[in-house]
Image: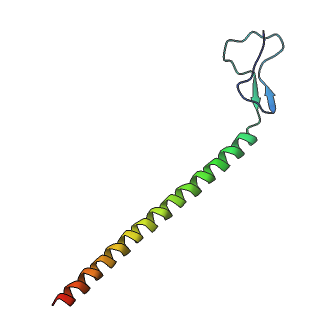
Amino acid sequence: MTIVPKVSGYITDILVGDNQAVEADTPLAKLDTRQYQASLDQAKTTLDTRAADIQRAEADLRQQHANEEQAEVARVSRRTQKAM
């Protein structure tokens, strides 16, 4: 029988003995999780950074809309005063 891992990594512990009968999907070994944890931490940091970027962009957009509205009010006010 061929044994194929679902993921790669360094083995930290063997969970079965030589020639021990096992059921399908029984874990045979434990892997060192530091590599995966570091990748997960990096991905979370990237996600947090992107979320902050989105929040800043949304705030900038809201400010731009507010500035445009104020500019329009000022234009209308000037037109109204000129018409009087």
In the figure, is residue 67 to the left or right of 80?
Answer: right
Task: Tally the numbered discs.
Answer: 0
In the figure, is residue 13 to the left or right of 26?
Answer: right
Return the x and y of residue 54 as percentages of the image width and height: 50, 58
In the figure, is residue 53 to the left or right of 4?
Answer: left
Q: Residue furthest right?
A: 18
Residue displayed at 77% across by 36% down: 32
Answer above or below: position of 65 versus 46.
below
Where is residue 12, by image quadrant?
top right
Q: Which quarter of the rendering shows the N terminus?
A: top right
Residue displayed at 28% across by 81% down: 75
Residue displayed at 45% across by 62% down: 58
Q: Residue furthest front?
A: 83
Answer above or below: position of 61 versus 14.
below
What colour scheme has been applied to the protein in the rendered image?
Answer: rainbow
Q: Which quarter of the rendering shows the C terminus?
A: bottom left
Front one among 50 and 29: 50
Residue displayed at 32% across by 73% down: 69
Where is residue 81, by image quadrant?
bottom left
Return the x and y of residue 16 as percentages of the image width and height: 78, 18
Q: Which residue lies furthest to the left in this view?
A: 84
In the figure, is residue 40 to the left or right of 66?
Answer: right
Return the x and y of residue 83 as percentages of the image width and height: 17, 88
Front one among 66 and 22: 66
Return the x and y of residue 46 as percentages of the image width and height: 62, 53
Answer above or below: position of 9 versus 61.
above
